[in-house]
Image (cartoon, helix red, strand yellow):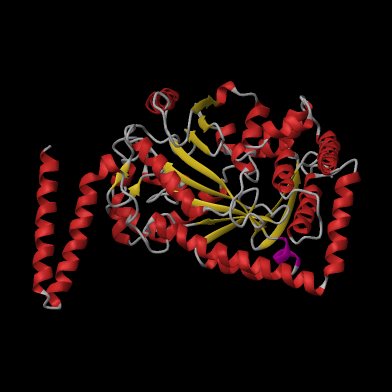
Amino acid sequence: MKCQECGEREATLHFTKIVNGKKAEFHICEHCAREKGEHIPGSNSFSIHQLLSGLLHLDKPINTSQDKVNRPKELVCHNCGMKYEQFTRTGRFGCAACYKSFEDKLDPILKRVHSGNHTHSGKIPVRVGGGIQLQREIDSLKAQMKQYIEREEFEQAAETRDQIRALEEQKKNQGEG
Amino acid sequence: MSLQKFISEAISPWMKKDGADSDIVLSSRIRLARNLKEYKFPLLATMEESSAVVKQVKESLLTDDNQETGPLELVLMEDLKANEKRVLVEKHLISPNLAEQSKHGAVILSEDESVSIMINEEDHLRIQCLFPGFQLTKGLEAASRLDDWIEERVTYAFDEKRGYLTSCPTNVGTGLRASVMMHLPALAMTRQLNKILPAINQLGLVVRGIYGEGSEALGNLFQVSNQLTLGKSEQDIVEDLRDVVMQLIQQERAAREVLMQSSKLQLEDRVYRSYGILSYSRVIESKEATQRLSDVRLGIDVGLLENVSANILNELMILTQPGFLQQYAGEVLSPDLRDERRATLIRERLKLENDTNE
């Protein structure tokens, strides 16, 4: 089969795209694929970012006349200089500090991408996150203590309280160390 | 080079081991996306910064022994020829993106190639662990230990609220992408996939053909992976995926039973026709080759075809890709020539199989 772009070389890439809900088949050679910047199946897909960028634009507030008068200054990451608009276009952050720079905008975006979640509850790195790990344990013990009190199991509640105190002490020493 | 020697060098050592349920799950993969705190992400990094990342990772990781992975070796993309990079992509050790577009891209590989750490891909580090068969839980444990070992030596970009910070918001949180490569020929033949795959998408998992997003499944090989990376623990993410994969395995096995009971002769005919084509054809396109290999592999798995090793599918799927064909030929091949060489390689490989059995 010849490439449908140049008509000269053999088509080596065959893929299906859904365009406006219609299935379209493409048969092109690698040369034309590269020229067109066509996404080569298996390559790190650009489509996810386009899709994401489409999602990110959804969070634009509906302009009211008020907005037009005092336009907010554009958000820019203080560390790498990435503009928020650039992030919504590319669907990627420029550096770790972008997360703080665009903090106020991120919850709805992350919720959309991660089925309603916007806060991490997985692994914590040992070196960077020692304090965080302790805080998590403290929080979970506090919740447990509350339950004991509600059930009037005061002995267990007191034991848990002592555990919490010990951990808080540990955390304080860590901060000073 | 003899074919036997070529194959033994071409196939990653980890692939030669056995794993659970390997008649349906060919391999399991755990990938963790990580970034170094003090550098811009690769997207915005200057050439100097990217080069500094490679230097730092090299100094931090390669001067130390890792008992579990064994010796690690760093390979710079700029030191590789185009076809050598292509071969690494076909072995799933690096992404096409790293091979083609990265600034100062590099990869760290373990000797058995079960560990691959890409440097300066979309994130500074993409830690990848590969396992034969269905081994997600064990895979996660091993990847997590390697992650701990790396974190003792470099400082990760981590945030209490958002977790591991990544370039793309689709990876933030755990940075974890767990995936399995599945061979589902009976579900495809019995037309059940069209019903099952959308249902899997509803469960927050992604199903793709073997060649990544947007491509049709070649040879009935599918990659099933988690979509969300934030808000659940790594163990929960892997467990949810594992449950769905277990169901898929059961459904595929049931579909194979049905085929064997209701249309054994037709199935046998199909398997042997494909085996015949692979054994005798002189020119074969990659699309047909993967389909025929899928038939043969199914024949082996349901016991209709004996004296051919099951590994042949995984092996030939990889060996008949353009990069490997060119490496075996020792030259760049036009697509037409590739089709001829592909047919030759498959014939020789099957003949090798017969010779060993005689």
> Residue B71's spot in the image, x, y percent?
48, 28
Horizontally, residue B292 falls left or right of residue B47, namely right
* Figure quadrant of the C terminus of chain A: top left
Give the residue at x 72% y 50%.
B310
B187 is within the stretch colored magenta: yes
Give the residue at x 10% y 62%.
A161
Which span is picked out in magenta? B185-189
> Residue A111's spot in the image, x, y percent?
38, 60
> Residue B336's spot in the image, x, y percent?
85, 36
Give the residue at x 73% y 65%.
B186
Residue B107 visible in the displayed image: yes
Q: Main secondary structure of the magenta part?
A: helix
Picture quadrant where residue B16 is located:
top right
Residue B191 visible in the displayed image: no
Horizontally, residue B211 falls left or right of residue B140, namely right
Which residue is nearer to you in this view: B353 or B108? Answer: B353
> Residue A100's spot in the image, x, y percent?
28, 46
